Amino acid sequence: MRNQIMCAAALLVAVLSVPVMAADWTTPVQVQSGINTQYSERTPYLSYDGLSLYFQRYYSSGVNGCIFEAKRSQSTGPFTSVSQVLSGSNTVNCPWVSPDNLRMYYYEESNTWRIKVSQRASVNDPWSQGSIVQGLPSSSICSPSLSADELTIVFNNPNVGGWDMYMATRSSKDLAFDNVRSLSELNTAGSEIRPFLSPDALSIYYGGGLGQIFEATRQSLNDPFGNVQHLSAFDMPGGEAHPSISSDGKTFYFVVGAPADIYVSYLVPEPATLLLMSIGGVLLRKLKK
């Protein structure tokens, strides 16, 4: 029996040490009705616990866009309710919610677009009008996305370079941002629209020309972004982009068309990866016996 356990353990180590195979994404589909309507739904954001999908709904010219929340009781499956959670005297857009669900960052479209943050005491409290996030440029800025620790923020300036991307950092989420810089390593003569930052701030997703979506990565927080890749799995006729990936990296939302609709795609491991995972599970069960 001891020899069998040792052999099983050695095989398990060998299986788990095999490099992870490439994964694929499912064919994008529209999210369920009730979220997509005859109006425009944009800037989707899935909460860290997977229970809420935040997005903006824009009705028509002359009517302010508002932020909505779709809720569900489990992190998989359909959303069961949709309600408006934030509106204002001007259009509000592009929600990003902290992992503890207590802070919502967004931007308000006024004469000068500004990034704001709404704070609440508990997850059962409503979202109220936010205050301006300190340390960021006072000129028109929009489309905030943050790292999980809220120490790094990326955003757009629609008046520079046709929607250039910027980044800022801070040492504590209670302090103003600092070290604002243009993401010149990614900005082009075209538009880089609605950047979305991964939780570890090592990957960034953004929309380019013709509604295409791009990903760029870096090795550390002190490095510039590089290794730009076109994520062709999300190319759709009439694409508008607005990329957003879940905190576990397995669900990808983006926006297509006019009026805009939210689409979703799910990460599916390659068959070889699934086989390795299955073998590993069998061996683990044998080791427990």
Image (spheres, helix red, strand yellow):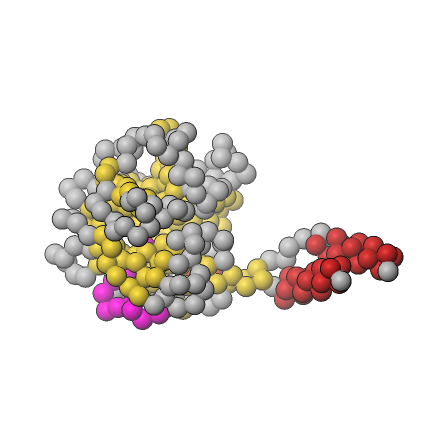
Picture quarter with the N terminus: bottom right
- Left or right: 243 as drawn, with respect to 81: right
Pick whichever, 69 or 120, lies toward us: 120
- Left or right: 107 as drawn, with respect to 234: left
Residue 48, x across and y down, in percent: 42, 51
The residue segment tinted magenta is 30-43
> Is residue 176 in sight in this rendering?
yes
- Left or right: 280 as drawn, with respect to 117: right
**Residue visible at 46% across and 59% down in the picture:** 251
Residue 148, x across and y down, in percent: 43, 43
Pick whichever, 217 or 160, lies toward us: 217
Magenta stretch contains residue 41: yes
> Is residue 213 in sight in this rendering?
no
Pick whichever, 74 or 10, lies toward us: 74
Picture quarter with the C terminus: bottom right
Above or below, comparing residue 238 to residue 94 in the picture: below
Predominant SS of the magenta segment:
loop
Magenta stretch contains residue 199: no
**Residue visible at 75% across and 56% down in the picture:** 12
